[in-house]
Image: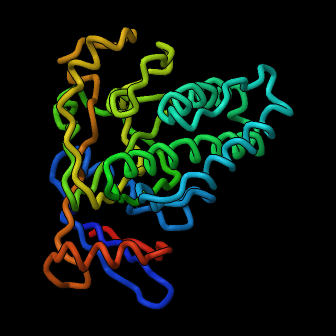
Amino acid sequence: MTIKYYTIYLKDDITEYQFVYELELHTPAQAWAHMMMGLSVKDLRSGLDPWRGRQQDLSQMISELNSLIVDLNTWIPEKITATWDNEDVKSSLNRLHVHFPELEIIYKNDLIKKAQLSRYNDVIHGIEQAHQAQVQGKDSLRLLLCPKSKRTVIQEEDYTLFSPEISWGDLLLHYPHVGRHPLELCLNDDRACPQEQIIPQHEISAFHTLRFHDQSVDNFQEFYCHSKLTWPYAVHDPRLALGYIRLGKLMSVDNQEIDKDKIMSIVNTCNSVLEWSID
């Protein structure tokens, strides 16, 4: 059965809004859609704020990150000793991120400790995206939705669907692994990531993002060649999975044609995800 549409309902304090996406017909989009058919908002990972990429005061998030480090250091065997540097946000985040993949492997079956580690990871990525928006001088707003789901392996012929280019209104397959993918490394200028933590995307899960910004990356090859990282594949190998696979495109909001300014004002006021449907 071919699935053509993904409809998601968002809400602000008063009003409910219907966002309809027309889905791609390729194998990853259809595999993702079939996963989503069996899921609901009850399957979203609790504690994860889906609204990402706004320009905002970073101080509160940095304060939470520092508090999390203090708490983690009460029980992790090798303490986190890296300190925060307000003058070099990217390097601070890169140094701190390395601990999450290491610790997640050790404590993946301990639900309480895993939840604390997940929050540590979420805050790091929240700061990354808010800082990127701050540096660019504009929001790079997206909704990140992470329902718990099964996974399926990406077929070799589908790696050509990955792209680092993002357009406003895109519905994108999101990265589900514990590690860092090549585009993430490039965007964060991470030149110290351990070899075993460079993990290109190789599975499809229900994780996805609704993108309300544009993004163009033209320096990856230069970064690849000069980063001195140990890459798993050659620079032009599709298995690097550079970027994301587009699953679909926003076609209407409340059955009206696309008006970017109006839609941005709606998205910026929404604060909850009500439900979705696949058909």
Taking depth in this image into account, of 52 and 117 the one nearest to the observer is 52
The outermost residue toward the right is: 74
In the image, 79: left or right of 25? Answer: right
Q: Residue 128: x, y in percent?
A: 47, 43
The outermost residue toward the bottom is: 14
Q: Residue 204: x, y in percent?
A: 36, 41
Q: Residue 121: x, y in percent?
A: 59, 41
In the image, 147: left or right of 104? Answer: left
Image label count: 0
Quadrant position of the N terminus in the picture:
bottom left
Q: Residue 201: x, y in percent?
A: 36, 31
Quadrant position of the C terminus in the picture:
bottom left
Q: Residue at x 35, y 82 (%)?
A: 17
Whether residue 171 is situated above or below residue 251 in the rendered picture: above
Q: Residue at x 39, y 9 (%)?
A: 230
Whether residue 95 is situated above or below residue 93 in the rendered picture: above
Colour scheme of the rendered structure: rainbow
Is any atom of residue 4 visible in this view?
A: no
The outermost residue toward the front is: 87
Q: Residue at x 42, y 18 (%)?
A: 191
Q: Residue at x 39, y 54 (%)?
A: 35
Is any atom of residue 11 visible in this view?
A: yes
Whether residue 193 is situated above or below residue 247 in the rendered picture: above
Whether residue 40 is situated above or below residue 223 in the rendered picture: below
Taking depth in this image into account, of 99 and 85 the one nearest to the observer is 85
